[in-house]
Amino acid sequence: MIQDGPTTGLAGVDRHPTDQDSWGPRLAAILNPPQLEAVTAPDGPLLVFAGAGSGKTRVLTYRIAHLIESGRAQPDGILAVTFTNKAAREMRQRIESLLGAGQAEGPAGSPGTPGRGERPASWGGSPAWMGTFHNICGRVLRRDGHLIGVDRSYVIYDEGDRLSAVKRAMAGLGLDEKRFPPNAVVGRISTAKNEIQGPTEYAAAASDYFSEVVARVYPVYEGFLRDASGLDFDDLLLKVVRLWQEDERSLERWRHRFRHVLVDEYQDTNRVQYTLVKLLAEEHRNLCVVGDDDQSIYRFRGADVRNILSFERDFPEARVIKLEQNYRSTQSILDAAHAVIKAVADRADKRLWTDRGAGEKVFVAQVYDEQEEAEAIAAEVRRLVARDGSLNDIAVLYRTNAQSRALEEVMVRQGIPYKLVGGVRFYERREVKDALAYLRVMFNPNDTVAFNRVVNVPRRKVGDKTVQVLEAAARQRGISVWDLLAAEARPAGITASAAEGLQEFRALVEGLRRELDRHPLPEVIEMTLARTGLQAWVSDGSEEGAERWQNLLELKGLAAEYSGLRGMEALGRFLEDAALVSDVDSLDEAKPGLTLITLHMVKGLEFPVVFMAGMEEGLLPHIRAIEEPGGIDEERRLCYVGMTRAMRRLYLFHAFRRHLFGNANLNLPSRFLNDLPEEIVERPAGSSRSTGANRASVLDAVSRQPAAPAPPPVQRYREGQRVSHRAFGPGVVVKSTLTRSDEELIVRFDNVGIKILSASLAPLETA
Ligand code: ATP
Ligand code: MG
């Protein structure tokens, strides 16, 4: 039976000729009834409110396809906001395959600009816009920013740029970085922008000393950005809100263009994002948002879960659809996740079910420390892969980036390929940033951060002092540094050799700018690398140098996507995309390897096998959250997001002892583990709460640790005794102390130095 939406249906609208017979039945066959209702619901506000893995993203994707297929919307009348650009890309591909080749030119992106760009080749007759808020706002500003004084060739200040601008502002105000950490100042400014507070509003609301300090830095920082035509990430959104609040005609045009607005992961929108969506959609009201209050995990970035909970108040006529069937995970995994999330105080109760059966139990094990944790995971990974699993099916999730180090070390040692999401990003590598800075100055010579970065790279005798004198002179005359250099060969106060270096730099950049009109972007990048001396500088014969050169070549390779555009335009888009690439965007599913990723980044993804490392008090929940009001609930949601990524098998590890941030801590198992019903939990054989059968795997090794210290303590080791530790190797006992419940040992290991160990838990043997 074909079930159509309640009022509009496939039967009632013109279908695309190529799909006449297959589309409707196909939809009904691949969607469950509430999903189908959401996909085919008529115009007007629509909220799909449902738990993890229930098909929200799928519904959004199919709804877009349906809008196009049914003729209710042209591709270019659709705006879809996703959490990452990668998600947008996947959505685009999916729609393309759904609609068939006949309509591929619609949402698929024009040939020659696929991939990271996510943008239409031109304004008219273009495909749907899909991307993150930042990506979309960047595009809006390129077109309309000038209406509120945003330079068409604005540059995006990334995290590093913004930190250096704040530091400069603080130095100018004589503020001590030790007393007022610049990172914290950056954070406050960012929060203010996400709350749509400019410097004046912020200053008016400042109520404590630190806020007052920030209130002084904020306008100076804004001044720097203005002079450099720079926008930070938050500005991209904030400026569009200002644009639409101040310029009615611009707002009208965009409203008219995007007759259908769809937002994924709506629970994590913050105030500025919420305002954007509302401005755009409140007139035509064709707004479809999907989300899950249980997965709201970006409170620290200003995300407000109330946005989803109050959707029905903002749009009282909204149709609300709940999805309860989960298609991702087994029932055991769902039950475990539900046990953790149900304790959250302020949530809309919902429970997921699946027809996939109970599946394997959730595996919970204690390990000695992070080293052993990594080894246990590696061994289990090997076992899974040997049983014809694929590394690409497996992910290891953790709470903090710092946890990846131990995991990486073991994977490297054991030759297990892995993909780290959120390490030193490609675009943050030094040589890549240098090359990009040159390109930025070419694009916009007033980009001060970029100018300062490379004016003396490689050395041209232009020191910091020269730059300061130059900036002061330019400010005094009310012109830009670049214009000053054009007007005067040697501005006052500049030494002859510095002036020579500056003019050399200017001539170099101007020369390269001219090349942009004549050659495709990759060629201009090649010229840039050669003429600026970057190529010679990185190619120093060392292995590291070779790697740097590879990275620069990679940068050039990425520019190939923009070859079809004219010089400056190509460069502008290339730079914008480079600035907006997120960690997850660079995750390449096709590349073989295990995925290492933080809980915050893993949202929306799924893997057949998931390991969660560090299920300990202080880590998950994180120590900072324990003290904050509402903090534990946020950590519960984070844990829930992690667990619900797993399709078939979920492993939870907690270490007895963990070295993190330079300290060794004895950690208690996470309180979230206590919430798991024992009947869906499997523990390694021999552990105190074991329920499972003996498994022939690495986990036997894990199981050799008793889960709890065995009282009463007896002295088993003496000072001077040779011992051997499974991970640390051979060593000698320096000191043994009996505590109330255990014997604490200080051991000097031959290879790794002094460690403090607990005799009852450490995998120690007497030698
Ligand atoms: P999350 O909350 O984690 O973002 P979600 O609600 O967006 O999850 P999806 O990612 O859309 O869920 O779907 C989860 C998985 O279930 C996907 O692999 C999807 O293809 C599959 N799925 C969803 N609906 C169906 C269906 N009706 N039939 C078969 N598979 C489905
Ligand atoms: Mg989703």
Image (tube, rainbow, N blue to C red):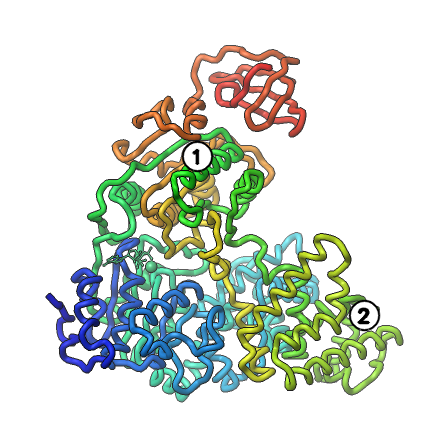
Which of the numbered marks, if any, corresponds to residue 654? 1
Q: How far apart are marks 2 and 1 (CA)?
A: 53 Å
- Characterize the local packing of mark 2: few (<14), some (14-19) or many (20 or more) Cα atoms within 10 angstroms: many
Between 614 and 70, the one nearer to me in the picture: 70
- For label 2, the SS is loop
Q: Position of residue 25 (x, y in %)?
A: 17, 68
Of the 4 image quadrants, the one containing the N terminus is bottom left
Task: Indicate left or right for 500 with 156 as reference.
Answer: right
Residue named by callout 2: 462
- The residue lying at 44 percent from left, 85 percent from top is 123
- The residue lying at 33 percent from left, 64 percent from top is 307
Q: Earlier in the sequence, mark 2 or mark 1?
A: 2
- The residue lying at 85 percent from left, 77 percent from top is 500
Q: Where is residue 95 in the image (x, y as percent from the top left)?
A: 32, 70
Is 702 situated above or below 214?
above
* Residue 271 visible in the displayed image: no
Residue 268 is drawn in which quadrant?
bottom left
Task: Indicate left or right for 630 with 552 as reference.
Answer: left
Residue 320 is drawn in which quadrant?
bottom left
For ligand 2, the image quadrant comes to bottom left
